[in-house]
Image (cartoon, grey):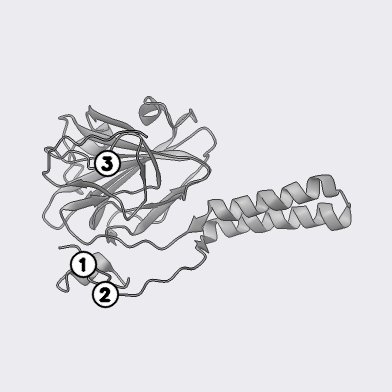
Amino acid sequence: MWASEEAPKWRCMSGELRDNRGRGNAEWGFPAIHPEGRKFGLIGVAVALVVLLGLEWTWIGWPLLVLSAGIFAFFRDPERVVPQDENLIVAPADGLVTLISKVAPPPELQGDDGNGRGLGEAPVTRVSIFMSVFDVHINRAPVAGTVRRIVYIPGRFMNADLDKASEENERQHILIEQAGGRSIGFTQIAGLVARRIVPFIKPGDIVAAGQRVGLIRFGSRVDVYLPAGTDAKVLLGQRIIAGETVLAQMGSEMLLEGVHQ
């Protein structure tokens, strides 16, 4: 079931249902700018206008205007069409799949803290998504369920593309428990340029698959820990779209191969 008429409303939230048989509307439009980024863009525009009109330093004023446009573009928040199936895990971030490996989940996501069952200590498949400054940086819930755990950990600001960034960089772990009791964990990791992780949710919130859950400013990475017995449906080096690309299907193990051309 991708967009069944019986899909619970708490999973779809208030969005319009669309399907592969033509239901719904499709139209192009400029993506919205998330409120978190409007202030930065407006500050950039104000500084550029002062330099251009007040100081008449055109050699620096015009580049500042271009930079302001880039800031607005960085915080763009496009709409996404999210597959509706409780067995699917959708990508929580736009970007490039840079790592797929078997690792133990972070300690913060392993045990039962009284609020929800953790992921356990056994190694699972971790999919790492690297977001450059050109990618959309709004992160989305990979599944529908209840937010059971949010753990923020201060740290360094190494290149987020490095494997050890998962353990050394500033990061935020999130655990979502589905209605059937199955838990999915993912981690927002600040990178070399990113200096702040901004959450939109808190423990106890009920989220829909693909719902906006936070952002990381200016380049970063998101790690997703798939349940045991589940392989990724994306390939190393593949570009994926948050809320739309199917990252995995629960309980599906299959070798997928691709050719880089």
The relative height of residue 175 versus residue 7 in the rendered view (above or below) is above
Residue 107 position in % (x across, y down) = 25, 32
Query: What whole-number distance in Å separates the C-alpha atoms at marks 3 and 2?
Result: 27 Å
Tell me which numbered mark, 1 or 3, is placed earlier along the sequence.
1
In the displayed structure image, the side of residue 136 where residue 150 appears, left or right:
left
The relative height of residue 116 versus residue 106 in the rendered view (above or below) is below
Q: Is residue 198 something that shows in the picture?
A: no
Residue 101 position in % (x across, y down) = 25, 29
Return the residue at label 1.
3
Tell me which numbered mark, 1 or 2, is placed earlier along the sequence.
1
Return the residue at label 3.
234
**Amino acid type of disc 2?**
Arg
Residue 136 position in % (x across, y down) = 46, 50
Q: Residue at x 37, y 26 (%)?
A: 163
Q: Secondary structure at mark 1?
A: loop
Mark 2 neighbour class, 10 Å CA radius: few under 14, some 14 to 19, many 20 or more: few
Mark 1 neighbour class, 10 Å CA radius: few under 14, some 14 to 19, many 20 or more: some
Q: Secondary structure at mark 2?
A: loop
Look at the image and tell me in which quarter the N terminus lies.
bottom left
Q: Residue at x 48, y 35 (%)?
A: 191
**Amino acid type of disc 3?**
Val
In the displayed structure image, the side of residue 239 where residue 175 appears, left or right:
left
Look at the image and tell me in which quarter the C terminus lies.
top left
Tell me which numbered mark, 3 or 2, is placed earlier along the sequence.
2
Which residue is at the front of the view, 12 or 145? 12
Residue 238 position in % (x across, y down) = 34, 39
Q: Are marks 1 and 2 in contact (CB under 8 Å)?
A: yes
Return the residue at label 2.
23
In the displayed structure image, the side of residue 111 where residue 28 appears, left or right:
right
**Amino acid type of disc 1?**
Ala
Query: What whole-number distance in Å separates the C-alpha atoms at marks 1 and 2?
Result: 10 Å
